[in-house]
Image (tube, rainbow, N blue to C red):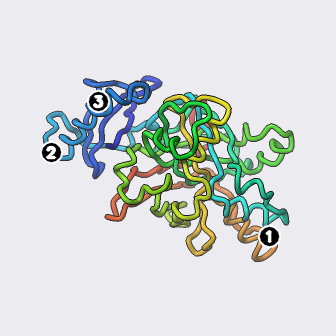
Amino acid sequence: MKLATYKDGSRDGQLVVVARDLGLAHYASGICSRMQQLLDDWGFLAPQLQDVYDALNAGRARHAFPFDPRQCMAPLPRAYQWADGSAYLNHVELVRKARGAEVPASFYTDPLMYQGGSDDFLGPCDDVALPSAAMGIDFEAEIAVITGDVKMGTAPEPALDAVRLLLLANDWSLRNLIAAELAKGFGFFQSKPATAFSPVAVTPDELGAAWQGGRVHLPLQSTWNGRRVGRCDAGPEMTFHFGQLIAHIAKTRNVRAGSVVGSGTVSNKDWSRGYSCIAEKRCIETIESGAPQTEFMQFGDTIRIEMLGADGKSVFGAIDQQLVPLDEMGR
């Protein structure tokens, strides 16, 4: 099943069911109106929406309309929790190597994770307004999941059963603010503006054989200013799978339905696959030549993040955004 949230002038938007090929959609309002409502009562409502989805794919949905990702908010426009991991240890290794530091042994057994802002997510085609390009603006192409309820102390394998939906994320970073924030000892805050998500969230069964062991075994593409800069394999090199990331959160607390958990920047040891964030490219340049050459993003730049299935078709739709100065947004 594929789901999205359309803009309707409210904070939480209108839930829609989207066809497998992303061509058509159908409002879910006769069953439930909002994504969080569905997540809170998944066992009862999801089978009803599955019937709508089946009818939509079979051409039997009477009130279907063309799906437009530009009308989408984030699938879950605001969430009770957004916790982002760093599950691709190659990314951590590159960052550490570029500054001549070792990776602590604990990083390979205990996931890195930070808690980001979840009150204001960005839609997939929303302009990204930020105060200054001097902050070191960077995209981060990731995979994320939305969970059901998970009890405190749940182990990684049963935690996977709580994955309700998968989606793509662009976890925007302001690189030039990060060092000073981390030096305070409390982690990211101002350096992590609102995260953007793909138009569509999908149930795990939609991925077929690509969903294995809590990982998505498909390439994630990043296209910066019309040039593809990354086609990173999201599967084999994900050190911690989503069950492990969810269990990490649940070690000392309950995880409630509607929590969003990110994978961290998708990263591969094979540098020919490109990169999922500019910081990683700069690290590679530093390792190879002693200093970075690639600049961070400027106002007017665009970024497109997308994942294609084995059939060559878009699975989640694309995050397709442009950077603009804050004052142009009238905020």
Could you say which is closer to the camera, residue 93 or residue 318? 93
Q: CA distance from mark 3 to mark 1?
A: 52 Å
Residue shown at 32%/26% (left/top)? 44
User: What amino acid is at disc 2?
Assistant: Gly
The kind of secondary structure element at disc 3 is loop
The kind of secondary structure element at disc 1 is loop
Q: Quadrant of residue 29?
A: top left
Vertical position of residue 244 compared to residue 258: above or below: below
Mark 3 / mark 2, whichever is N-terminal: 3
User: What's the mark number on residue 28?
Assistant: 3
Could you say which is closer to the camera, residue 288 or residue 252? 252
Mark 2 / mark 1, whichever is N-terminal: 2
> Disc 2 designates what residue?
59
For label 2, count other residues whose C-alpha is less than 10 Å away and answer few (under 14), some (14-19) or many (20+): few
Residue shown at 74%/49% (left/top)? 134
- Whether residue 167 sits left or right of residue 309 in the image: it is right
